[in-house]
Image (cartoon, helix red, strand yellow):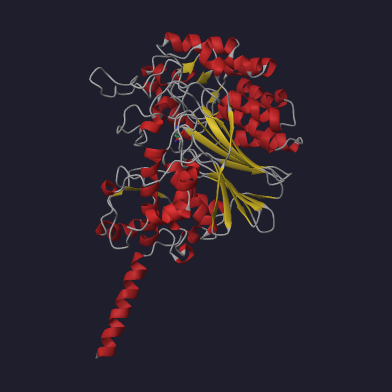
Amino acid sequence: MKKIFILLFVSLLFFQCKQQQIPPSKQVLEKGLITKKAMVVSARKEASEIGVAIMKKGGNAFDAMIATDLALVVVYPFAGNIGGGGFTVYRTKDGEIGSFDYREKAPLAASRDMYLDEDGNVIPNKSTLGAMAVGVPGTVAGLFKIHERFGTLPFSELIQPSIDLARKGVIITKKQANSFNKYREFFEKANNRTIFLDKDWKEGDTVKYLKLAKTFERIRDNGRDEFYKGETADILVDYVKDLGGIITKEDLAKYEAKWRKPITFTYKDARIISMPPPSSGGICIAQMLKSIEPFDISKFTHNSTKYIQLLTEAERRSFADRSYFLGDPDFNDIPIDSLISSKYNNKRMINFNWDSATNSSEVSYGNITGMESNETTHYSIVDPFGNAIAVTNTLNGAYGSKVYVQEGGFFLNNEMDDLSSKPGEPNMFGLLGAEANAIEPEKRMLSSMTPTIVEQNGKLKMVLGSPGGSTIITSVFQNILNVLEFDMGMQESVSAPRFHHQWLPDEIKFETRFDTIAFPQLRKKGYNISQGNSRILGKVDAILVLPDGKLEGGADPRGDDMAVGF
Ligand code: DON
């Protein structure tokens, strides 16, 4: 009788475990494009093709990066830009690593309370919509500085395909047509006319960007200073001023892009290279990976209750630190080494237990003793020489501030919203900022962009990154684990459903197609669950070096993204 009882009990346990298991994403078993030598994975086919054409001509990954970037301005105005900024992480064929910051800066006339009314309340939309939301753009300075150091083909050859494309016109996808139509009212609210107001868009329509082609021709002929001191600078400043903005010619003339020392750390047998401040990305994925490193993750079921729980607790603690410690490194001392150390992160996880959720209200930033001496698009490139580059660029919101410099043919960012309008007041991604990210003239705003490169056994393993505001970090985090711990291929990893926690609000956000089977267990343990309609988290474009040295692309099916290579 006792034996039967035990047997019944064990079967029940087994049945319950089975019930809890999420069907492994292995069942998806998708394969991405596989090529021998080189690849570009970006938000649009045309941009990937242009980058690849440059490498076929003999250009390297850096040449391809510049050409892809400029092509995205034409084919992906949602986020591709010259009116915004971004970050790049690279690893050369010889293993030299570096990162590069061409993030926007607050204008000289910016001030701490510029988005508050006389009662000290945040004025709705002022930091997100219209000319006051615009930070000083960095993209053009970034592209020229990268070209100066690493480019092998003349800049004119890298920009020409985009000039030709802008003149010929771009055939828009269904997603783009919907997006142009959806944002019409905001273009109007930003008090300006864009070419996108002209009609009701549908899939297959052609858009010609003739003004943008002219701007690109002036940049081709006059170089970097065309954007910061030339006719384009005049056009930009006059337009922003007419709409009530504060960017001046002095702001543009003073802008400089910067080389930065990347964040590097090990996770088990891999070495991760990612973006340092003013992005929070590198520090946060380091913290998350260090927090979970002591666990034997490969034995967990992918996306099971246990897995979601552990990652959530690591994400919660890291985002709490982000909001307190991180900001522009030129304005703040950031205790990077302590923040990303195993010792610190293991200590932060001490109060985690499997039975119940840690409450975000009980989690603050960690204790660091002594300070030591943060709409977007990501693309990944590997060239035939073995150079790799991860690039994330942004206008912040979709079409940035919605201000479209008509004569120049390009959108301006609303990156000022990534600075903290008021301590304790969330930005458009629900992120909180503190003193380190308070508004100051010429400060770079804290970012979540996480262009990242992974090495294993001293060799290039993976190049990845994502758009998605705060969800960038957790998307990159989960894709690193998909490949390193669950042995997924690149496409399989990118396609796998994702979840996200950012400390506050205290909830786990799940993609719509995430299996709900773990939800009752998670709720029982005190986790708040949020699964909205048509929600996607991040849009990862990545490249994996396969054991035989071939490349596998992971182009995110959540967008129109495409891998092209040879
Ligand atoms: O730098 C940042 O973290 C944000 N401005 C990124 C915005 C973003 O990813 C929007 N994309 N969906």
Figure check: 376 above or below 367: above
- Give the quadrant of residue 163: top right
Residue 188: image x %, image y %?
38, 17
Instruction: Judge by depth and name the residue closer to the eye, 281 or 34.
Output: 281
Q: Is residue 110 visible?
A: yes
Residue 490: image x %, image y %?
56, 52
Figure check: 46 above or below 552: above
* Residue depicted at x 57% and y 19%: 209
Residue extending farthest left: 119
Instruction: Judge by depth and name the residue closer to the eye, 369 or 250.
Output: 369
The reply, left or right, for residue 84 in relation to residue 154 is left
The reply, left or right, for residue 112 in relation to residue 254 is left
Instruction: Judge by depth and name the residue closer to the eye, 554 or 348.
Output: 348
* Residue depicted at x 67% and y 35%: 62
- The quadrant of the rendering that contains the N terminus is bottom left
- Report the image quarter containing ligand 1: top left
The reply, left or right, for residue 119 in relation to residue 517 is left
Residue 434: image x %, image y %?
35, 33
* Residue depicted at x 51% and y 16%: 251
* Residue depicted at x 46% and y 16%: 108
Q: Can residue 496 be seen in this view?
A: no
